[in-house]
Amino acid sequence: MTLFIEQLINGLQLGTMLFLMASGLTLIFGVMGLINLAHGSFYMVGAYATALVSAATGSFLIGLAAGIAAAAAVGALVELIVIRRLYHRPHLDQVLATFALILIFSEGTRWLFGSSPLWLNAPAALSGSIALPGGSRYPIYRLVIIAVGIMVAVGMYWLISRTRLGMRIRAGESDREMIGALGVNIARLYTLVFAMGAALAGLAGAMVGALQSVQVGMGEPVLILAFVVIVIGGIGSIKGALYGAILVGVVDTLGRVFLPLFFRQFMTSSEAAGVGSALAAMLIYILMALILAFKPKGLFAAND
Amino acid sequence: MIKSTTPSLAPRRVPTPAASWHDRKHLVQIGLLAVLLLAPLSAYLLGHVYYVNLASRLTLIAMAAVGLNLAIGYGGMVSFGHAAYFGLGGYVAGISAYHAFDFTPVIGWPIVIPGSDSMLAIWLATMLVCGLLALVIGTVSLRTSGVYFIMITLAFAQMVYYFANSWPTYGGEDGLPIYLRNSLPMVDTQDPLTFFLICFGGLVMSLALTSRIMKSRFGAALTMARLNETRLATAGIAPYPIRLVAFVISAMITGLAGALYADLNGFVSPTMLSWHMSGELMVIVILGGVGRLYGPLAGAILFVMMETLLGGLTEYWKLFLGLVLLLVVLFAKHGVMGWLAGRERP
Amino acid sequence: MTDAVLTLAHLNKRFGALQATRDVTLDLRPGEIHALIGPNGAGKSTLIAQIAGSLKPDSGGIHLAGQEITSLSVAQRARLGLGRSFQVSSLAEPLTVLRNVMIATQALQGHSFRFWKPVHRDESLLTPATAALERMELTHRADTPVSELSHGERRQVEVACALALTPRVLLLDEPMAGLGPEGSARLTELLETLKHEVPILLVEHDMDAVFRLADRISVLVAGGVIAHGDSAAIRANPQVREAYLGD
């Protein structure tokens, strides 16, 4: 039971990270109609900047701020130079151009900082753990990640439903021609939305960077999970991204722990580990296929 | 019912303005094939086996991209998961050879399927297995379109990738060696030039097949499914099965290339299944010119040349690949074939 | 009623609060042009979509030549002989006129899973496609890509595509739109002879053409048929004048 609670919280933590990635991706798709593979690169940029600035200043918080700022700045720059040429292009071109951006970012980072990972430590104040019901202890830092994720979700809800910017974003989602006619500066809105998505990815990368190592290619597995999330949730829907992220985070985490345990009931433990982990690796994709079989546009399809 | 008015059976005119374009395209096509055939021949005679194997690699990447081009270029199905079929073909070759080496069956129950080191058996099995996987993935994915299709094909390929990574029997993430290249009757597949010729044959066959298919009724329907789905349905042909069959054929071609690729390297690993592989196959199709019969070959030549030349200068050559790709996508939409052979008429 | 080629019985379609189709019952008989008119937003497009098969009605039935087609797909209906043209031209722009028409003849000859024989030498496809083009006076444009055609010519190609299916019923969605007086007159003439070969359900905004061509007219307002009759009856109908002609 303790193991279950612990893994459930781990799942939630993965889910909130996925939400930070997926909400940016889905917002960019919803508003600009753009599929952005380079989103994982912003995650990496956020983690690198945080690790470098933290190491230089000795402060995780300053590092984190720098990481978010760097990701947002790189996002805005990429939007200005490359992305805005792609809005009216077919998805194939968008995929390839942003794939090219991944190559440029990954190899560029490797060139500048080498292939060996950087290390980033969580702030000392958050390095302790607290007791869970059942007696085991759980690291505070991971709980803080979940809290940050929830704050971002609430913040995004507020931003989109209550503010002027949010109104423009919603208008942009439902009718791209209309919003231009309303006299909103679309180019600036798009740059802003793109930079915001990049900043969220940078935030996720920075926070996860303190749990794992900071290295080239770290954004890619997360990017693909985030794709699964937004396909399940419905592309363009922030709400879908939230539910999808938590679903994928929890199912993936629990599957990896409990499927091998389950197969151990009727197999030798090495066999069970093999079958269990192979099946667990496929679990969220099977989940995605099942959901799509019934709802081809995802759970909360935003714009048809 | 409409009374059939007597149709005029005047001979169909071949539009004349296109003739010169036509010739130039054929010259470029023959030129590409000739270079691909003659370069390794001369390298072999000069004793540079490395270049023969490089040509085999190029040929197989081109063949895999020919398969993908059928889906993307001709069918309008932007599959971001063709590494699944490429890698699966590789694993069929690897697994079959592994069991043939061990004298154990691939499947022991309910029917016994023995391992085999015969390329013919492996190719047949590859087509079956890749076709089945594509049928399953296509059945789900083709219910969607646009960005959904791109992401779902990517996600399914990742599923296969993670499965291969975590399934310990065949090496997991370390991959599976093929100790002795699989064999063909009366042919020495160990010989680099002979093996190159097998690969070259595979490429030419897949080009010929694609060309033939696209001129047939099926090709006409597939073209219409890409250009205007509504028109196709209104004409009485359901688009979904047409797309699905094209997707399956496309996967089979890419899978065959993968089986040969594993034999070339004597090794298969999850790298062949990774999404970078899917991305690179797409890059090759685009560099060459999407929907052009010889585009994948032109793209593969450019890709392998960049890899060899730039890769010799810097280990960060993919940075430059990225820059070139970005420029091609943004500013040169018709790819190498568009530049060499002029604009394509559909 | 029994000899009708196409019948719609009590069709209903609702989108949320909007009743887009309200208990529509009408039929199409051999040798006639049955026109469907109505102001913008009356639900003509929704009704056409249900007949063609891209929308499923919530209730009611559609029969084509005695066979129930209510739950068949667009492609299945086309194979049973439902030819249609679109309000907005729906051709494959880069392909030639002939190729656009040939795809329709292809479906008539069984499935399209034939991978070997090149279509450009396939007389069994070329002959009927050429005939349909000739019927629409388009023979000289056969090898021209659709993207180079004028608006009026595209309309003609649309009809040729529908004819190439050797349909039992033609469903024409505003074929006169954007044609100009001369093109409009030519098409009117053509439809007048065509109707004896295949009955036509005509949705049209051009009232002159409708009153000249239609044997019967149904008036659609707010999703329902409010009046039905020949030209004279419709012209005289006070309800129609009020709802539609804006008196």
Image (tube, rainbow, N blue to C red):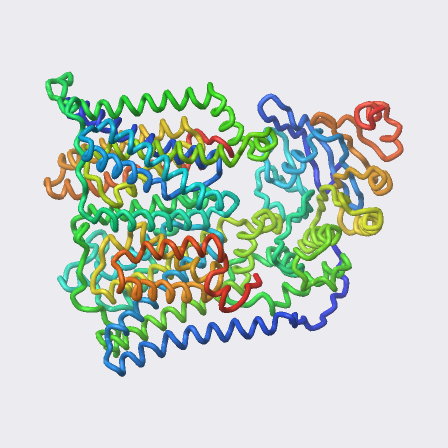
Residue B248 percent location from the top left of the image = 41, 55
Q: Is B272 displayed left or right of C8 in the figure?
A: left
- Residue C124 is drawn in which quadrant? bottom right
Q: Where residue B324 sits: x, y (%)?
A: 40, 57
Residue A36, position as x, y percentages in the image: 40, 42
Which residue is at the far top?
A133
Q: Is residue B54 above or below residue A83?
A: below
What residue sits 58% from the left and 23% below the top?
A: C16
Residue at the image position 51 percent from the left and 24 percent from the top? A167
Residue B120, picture quadrant: bottom left
- Kindly give the residue lying farthest to the front in the view shown: A57
Q: Residue at x 36, y 46 (%)?
A: B154
Q: Is residue C14 left or right of residue C41?
A: left
Residue B1 showing in the rendered view: no
Rendering coords of residue C180 (x, y %): 81, 47
On the rendered image, what quadrant is the N terminus of chain A found in?
Answer: top left
* Vertical placement of residue A259 versus B129, above or below: above
- Is B55 rendered above or below residue A277? below
| Observer-nearest of B174 and B9 | B174
